[in-house]
Image: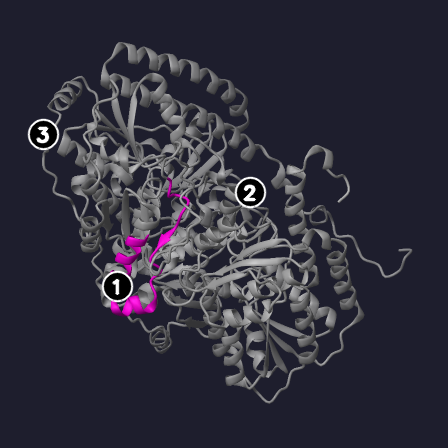
Amino acid sequence: MLLRHTTKEVKERKALTVNPAKTCQPVGAMYAALGVHGCLPHSHGSQGCCSYHRSALTRHYKEPVMAATSSFTEGSSVFGGQANLLQAIDNIFGIYEPQIIAVHSTCLSETIGDDLGQIVGKAKDDGRIPEGKHVVQASTPSYVGSHVTGYANMLEAFVKYFAFKTDEKLRQVNLLSGWVEPSDMRELKRLAGLMDVKTVLLPDTSDVVDTPMTGKYQMYPKGGTTIDEMVSMGNSMGTVALGEWGAKSAAIALDNKCKVPFSMNDVPVGISATDRFIQALSTAGKVSIPEIISEERGRLMDMMTDMHQYFYGKRVALFGDPDTLLPLTEFLLDLDMKPVYIVSGTPGKRFTQRMEEILGDKVSETKFKNGPNADMFLLHQWIKEEPVDLLIGNTYGKYIARDENIPFVRMGFPIIDRVGHSYFPTVGYQGGLRILEKILGAIMDKIDATAPEESFELVM
Amino acid sequence: MPNKKDYTNGLPDPSQLKEEMLAKYPRKVAKKRSKAMVINDPEENQEIAANIRTIPGIITQRGCTYAGCKGVVLGPTRDIINLVHGPIGCSFYAWLTRRNQTRVPEGGDNFITYSFSTDMQDENIVFGGEKKLKEAIREAFDIFNPSSIGIFSTCPVGLIGDDVHAVAREMKEELGINIFGFSCEGYRGVSQSAGHHIANNGVFKNVVGNNDRPRKGKFQVNLLGEYNIGGDAFEIEALFEEVGVELLSTFSGNSTIESMEYSHTADLNMVMCHRSINYIAEMMEEKYGIPWFKVNFIGAESTAKSLRKMADYFGDKELSAKVEEVIAREMAKVKAVADVVKPKTEGKLAMMFVGGSRAHHYQDLFTELGVKTVSAGYEFAHRDDYEGREVIPNIKIDADTRNIEDLVVEKDEAHFRDDLVEKKAKLEESGYQFKDYKGMMPDMKKNSLVIDDVNHWETEKLIEFYKPDVFCAGIKEKYVVQKYGVPLKQLHSYDYGGPYAAFGGAINFYTEMERMLGTKIWKLVDAPWKLEPEIVGSVTVDA
């Protein structure tokens, strides 16, 4: 057994986290910053933070992930990191020539009280930031929230820095996206295109962490939201924000700064959340919903009904981030599956409230938990109490899946042992099809592998 | 990209490349980087700047002290709960990402598949985290019943003044198991290297010598600095077992704390990765009189050489005969594969920037395939790993090094092996060498470019200048280099392949290079219409 020390009996834990279902803020800030064109993320802390985050993102995308670090030593930890950051800004603009440096803090720089705003202000006053270039900063202490919080904080920082309201009114809608894959970002843009709604998507990691092989390396690939686009967000008709944990604070900031109204939506995973997204986009963009969208939806519905017998009543355990877990849970319920165990390390009281709304009285035995000590160890213990038919989560789930012989579908961050998440979306109706294909594949592979010979089926 | 240079009469002088690399830097940066780049002359004593701070803003390969301590030295050991005291990230990122394989006997402990953390929250930063740490240790003890717990400090811990060592002592007393702490906050040193030293100190103080297990074998050895990435240690273990040498403990791969506790009963320490583990070798010699020498099991020739050196040390005819028998048998298998692969790889160019020993060790494997190493460097090594141990007395001790405790080790009279000291002296008289690391530079060709702590900009220039056939580094560099159309072999994780150690590993590496250097897949990168004259578009159907 890979997790041989995990036992059924749940003992209450207050201090010890085992096998976390989250990681820390800065990696989210780094990912969000990659979704801005010509931007180099910068980690203000020890070298290890930057190295770990780059490694995690690289393993997930199999793509270059560039970021710089303030390389703190004991001296900077005692005397403050200002000198390190100022020197870093000089070196980065001089050597790597980005348009934007997106600085995020770490537990180290936060603990010693470095004020990023003040340091960046000084860099500006000293003339260290070349004309037309920008340094944006976000406070992302690792001991608050999770990787999703860091993503949200960086997104908010971009909006606050760049979005600008003038008298010009633009017939466009802002899409503020929670943490999804580049494939999903591409899909969001495609759907908006079908709807004939001009959008500005922030962040946009498509064409950044899914770049083609050309034999040439580009430090700043063609993708990412541009400065002009971010500036123009202040003049948009409205904002469609996707995912409360990842995008709400940015949506509020944009509303406060530029009076751009927003609607708060789930990340469009599954049929119902995608329906709401399409309706929100239609309302914000003042367009009717074209037939081609209804047709896409119809294809997803078709597979849902065709394959219903394989979904019905199946018990599912899932872990990941609230913004995707909530609509995914809803999707599983739409399929008549039973999401029985749900865990997210990301804190937030809204999780309980939203989960209760979504679950209603549909599944009586569901256990869910988020925040401190809501970890994969607990999830595994619940599974040991009463088994499940399917597990959905990031790559770390494979240890539970193998020990317990559970069909396993990879969704979330990080996925470091399979490919596909960068290229095939899980959002929208197309994404729904992919999720179903994955679930069916996992469930049917187990049936095929374990069915007695006499009941081994050709047609399923 | 320029055409590939002609290397038949030796490597080209890379002075111009060096100038171009430095030209991009601000003056102060250029001055510092200049000292970290050496145009190698194996006949000369050249000095390289190493183990010094990375300049802020430079995109470096390096990680932190915590990574070196938790991730490297303690991470591969299965029967200890490695509890990370800090915010969640540090424990999360070091969770199973280094591929340290381990074979667990029936009923044995294995905590490697778990990540343990105190998941510090803002209130712990403000009011201190010692209480939470103690509680977490109690909970870990209650749930998992481990025989040892190690506590690893992350950046905020030292800053807020949590005393992990006091907590460890108190909890050890309370729970009656071995509990010890490491002050391995990420900022403690200039790279992972500081963490290695801190880990060595902690293991030596708290583990080594705790168990005087009676002898089990005629020849008892420890292997130091072998991390069992991709099963490397399994290959080496099998060799030792076959020739009849009892491998007590590996620091640390496929390892247990239990075996480290009786590792002081060895007759010999063999050091693979000099950088990360020479401290324990040195301290064990001072305290117990156990001699050490450097070995290398990367490369078939090097493996044979290392086995012979071990046999010579014991001076036992039967052992030597067995070693020769195994070498002869294995070398025949290796040669059969090399004969097929070498004609396809001969004359190709490699460069490698990794670790504290791998960038040196892997040159041996490449040499066996006729592949030339044109440029190499370490990520976190010290001058002695480049220039040889004889420079150690001349290495300037800077503030960053002074941060790390140098343990004062005293002779353990009860366990001291005078017989081994005598044996060592005798062997030395006949020219046998101990503590013998000559470093990477004397083994490299004239005009090869040696670069310490290579960074992203320099990597780009290196590729442009040398247009290598294979580049060896880590995950962060992998896809950058490959976008240029140059295959990259990860030498930290082996790209999830391996093992590459010993004879079986050499064969694996040869076939891997046959794939990487022989594949035509890169030729498909350009779409055919990019290579042909543009087809003129037309608006009519007929034209």
Q: Which residue is mark 3?
A: B414
> Quick one: B213 or B464, which is closer to the camera?
B213
- Relative side of B139 to A395, left or right: left
Q: Amino acid at mark 3?
A: Ala
Q: Which residue is mark 2?
A: A405
Kindly identify the residue that appears in the image at 26 percent across and 42 percent down.
B383
Mark-to-mark CA distance, 1 and 3: 43 Å
Comparing labels 1 and 2, the label whose residue is closer to the camera: 2
Kindly identify the residue that appears in the image at 51 percent across and 69 percent down.
A351
Mark-to-mark CA distance, 1 and 2: 47 Å
Rendering quarter of residue B354: top left
> Quick one: B473 or B326, which is closer to the camera?
B326
Q: Which residue is mark 1?
A: A77
**Label 1 is found on which chain of the structure?**
A
Evaluate whether residue B50 shows in this view: no
The secondary structure type at the circle numbered 1 is helix
